[in-house]
């Protein structure tokens, strides 16, 4: 028993040393620094363990070793587009596309995101429709199928996808599946064994050395991509599982947004997949023209923008802010989690205070309680600035969509929270097309019909218990 005080003192010393390292060595964002210091102060032993799981920084040298040269000719194209924009020599397919050249330039410079303007884009707001289209496209694949998903379930939908992959591999189609080791931690080994036996190439992103237990909570690959024959690409919020078809008793109907793209933007999606695959797999993909076999298929402008903890620039968040500051009429936002940092919060608030019609839609139920209470806290700030807030009631809202003035939009995997902006690997499609933006506005307005509006009066009636939960969750929101 006499050893216990010494052990406790050792933990306290470790706590102090860890706090000093957070402040002086790790150079975290100040809000995240204060949040971790509070956790270490109030729960010293538990806080130390939580930091080991959630708070460690990503070591780029140790984990991410891909060469910039692996960007498959991207650099040359990007530099050419930037020079053309700078010299007012860039050729646009139609006049509307010239309106947003500063946003194209931002993504070119910030993320080397090639601007393409020959795309055809289909929008899916329902899981059944999205996966019916994906399965049909996979059925018609003749060369390769590349899938990247954060979550893959071994349930009805997961089995349908697996059966199709097994069938196509037997036909000689090259099939690769990259999944996040944490998001897909409950996937049965039998599922993977069947796929591997059929010739499907499988790899896990950032796996743990201990089966079923992954303490690497941060730095997950949250991207969702599917590329078929280099000609068709899927990007958006749907993972693979029955809940995304609305079959979960907990969540009910699942409202999400996903895109099917044909055109040169698919090349950017393919590049993203290859970079992620080559990081995770020992069986690297070498450059081959057949992977970049896209064909012009329309006149929609698209940039595929990636972000993650391997960069200091928070590319997708910067794109959101630029979009919001460009608004002249309205900004519509759908997100399951609304925990903006100060820069994005100020952008939304300034837009609303300037008379821009700002509408924000969030779900009516939490899948992560602390995140949900923090979300309610931040939407209160938006109400004070004059924004309209809607609570989606039909089921669970998982869509990550921003639409500005019926001209530009973003659809992808990035939520409005610190985890998406700084800790996870995300990918979004930035869309430059009035018809497409209008369709997304229509979807938003249809969702309003099955939502309730949160007014300042209703918000003020929150119980004391909810207010306390909000306050605590907001304090730790930078590390959620």
Image (spheres, rainbow, N blue to C red):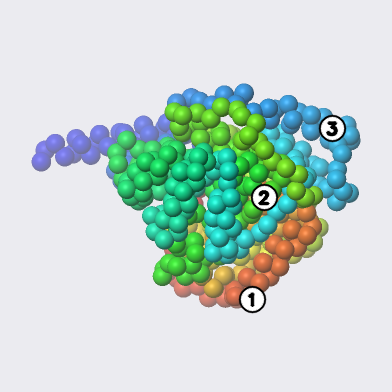
Q: Quadrant of the N terminus?
A: top left
Residue 40 falls in image quadrant: top left
The answer to whether residue 22 is left or right of residue 194 is right
Question: Which mark is on residue 298?
Answer: none
Q: What percent of the width, then of the height, locates residue 37?
A: 42, 42
Q: Which residue in the structure is indicated by mark 1?
A: 449
SS for tag 3? helix
Question: Which mark is on residue 261?
Answer: 2
Among the two numbered marks 1 and 2 on one chain, the one whose residue lies closer to the N terminus:
2
SS for tag 2? strand
Q: What percent of the width, then of the height, locates residue 279?
A: 49, 31
Mark 2 neighbour density, 10 Å: few (under 14) some (14–19) many (20 or more): many
Asked if disc 3 and disc 1 are in contact, CB closer than 8 Å, the reply is no
SS for tag 1? loop
Q: Which of 425 and 203 is in front in this view?
A: 203
Q: Which residue in the structure is indicated by mark 3?
A: 84
Q: Which residue is drawn at 74% across and 30% down?
A: 77
In this view, 249 is above or below 347 = below
Q: Which residue is drawn at 79% across and 32% down?
A: 82
In this view, 319 is above or below 458 = above
Among the two numbered marks 3 and 1 on one chain, the one whose residue lies closer to the N terminus:
3
- Of circles 1 and 2, the one toward us is 2
Q: How far apart are marks 2 and 3 (CA)?
A: 25 Å
Q: Nearer the viewer, residue 424 or 163?
A: 163
The answer to whether residue 56 is left or right of residue 258 is left
The answer to whether residue 250 is left or right of residue 103 is left
Residue 260 visible in the shown view: yes
- Of circles 2 and 3, the one toward us is 2
Residue 480 visible in the shown view: no
Q: What percent of the width, then of the height, locates residue 261?
A: 67, 50
Q: How far apart are marks 1 and 2 (CA)?
A: 28 Å
In this view, 392 is above or below 375 = below
């Amino acid at each position: 028993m006499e050893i216990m005080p010494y052990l406790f003192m050792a933990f306290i010393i470790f706590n102090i040393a860890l706090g000093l390292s957070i402040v002086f060595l790790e150079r975290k964002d100040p809000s995240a620094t204060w949040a971790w210091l509070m956790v270490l102060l109030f729960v010293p032993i538990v806080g130390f363990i939580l930091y080991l799981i959630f708070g460690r920084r990503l070591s780029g040298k140790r984990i991410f070793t891909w060469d910039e040269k692996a960007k498959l000719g991207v650099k040359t194209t990007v530099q050419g587009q930037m020079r053309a924009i700078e010299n007012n020599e860039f050729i646009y397919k139609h006049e509307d596309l010239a309106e947003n050249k500063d946003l194209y330039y931002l993504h070119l410079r910030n993320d080397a995101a090639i601007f393409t303007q020959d795309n055809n884009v289909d929008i899916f707001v329902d899981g059944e429709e999205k996966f019916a289209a994906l399965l049909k496209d996979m059925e018609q694949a003749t060369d390769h199928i590349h899938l990247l998903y954060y979550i893959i379930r071994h349930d009805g939908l997961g089995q349908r996808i697996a059966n199709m992959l097994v069938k196509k591999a037997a036909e000689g189609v090259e099939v690769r599946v990259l999944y996040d080791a944490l998001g897909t931690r409950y996937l049965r080994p039998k599922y993977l064994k069947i796929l591997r036996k059929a010739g499907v190439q499988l790899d896990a992103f950032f796996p743990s050395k201990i089966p079923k237990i992954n303490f690497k909570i941060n730095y997950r690959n949250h991207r969702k991509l599917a590329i078929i024959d280099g000609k068709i690409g899927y990007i958006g919020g749907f993972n693979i599982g029955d809940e995304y078809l609305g079959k979960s008793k907990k969540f009910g109907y699942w409202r999400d947004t996903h895109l099917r793209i044909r055109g040169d933007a698919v090349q950017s999606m393919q590049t993203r997949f290859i970079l992620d695959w080559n990081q995770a797999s020992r069986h690297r993909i070498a450059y081959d023209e057949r992977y970049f076999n896209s064909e012009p298929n329309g006149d929609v402008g698209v940039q595929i923008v990636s972000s993650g903890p391997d960069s200091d620039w928070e590319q997708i968040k910067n794109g959101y802010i630029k979009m919001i500051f460009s608004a002249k009429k309205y900004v519509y936002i759908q997100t399951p989690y609304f925990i903006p940092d100060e820069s994005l919060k100020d952008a939304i608030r300034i837009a609303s205070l300037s008379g821009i019609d700002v509408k924000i839609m969030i779900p009516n139920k939490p899948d992560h309680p602390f995140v949900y209470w923090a979300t309610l806290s931040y939407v209160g700030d938006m109400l004070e600035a004059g924004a309209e807030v809607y609570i989606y009631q039909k089921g669970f809202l998982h869509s990550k969509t921003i639409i500005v003035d019926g001209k530009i939009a973003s659809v992808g995997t990035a939520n409005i929270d610190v985890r998406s902006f700084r800790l996870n690997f995300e990918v979004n499609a930035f869309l430059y097309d009035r018809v497409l933006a209008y369709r997304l506005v229509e979807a938003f307005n249809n969702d309003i019909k099955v939502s309730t509006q949160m007014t300042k009066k209703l918000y003020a009636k929150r119980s004391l218990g909810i207010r306390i939960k909000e306050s605590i969750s907001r304090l730790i929101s930078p590390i959620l």
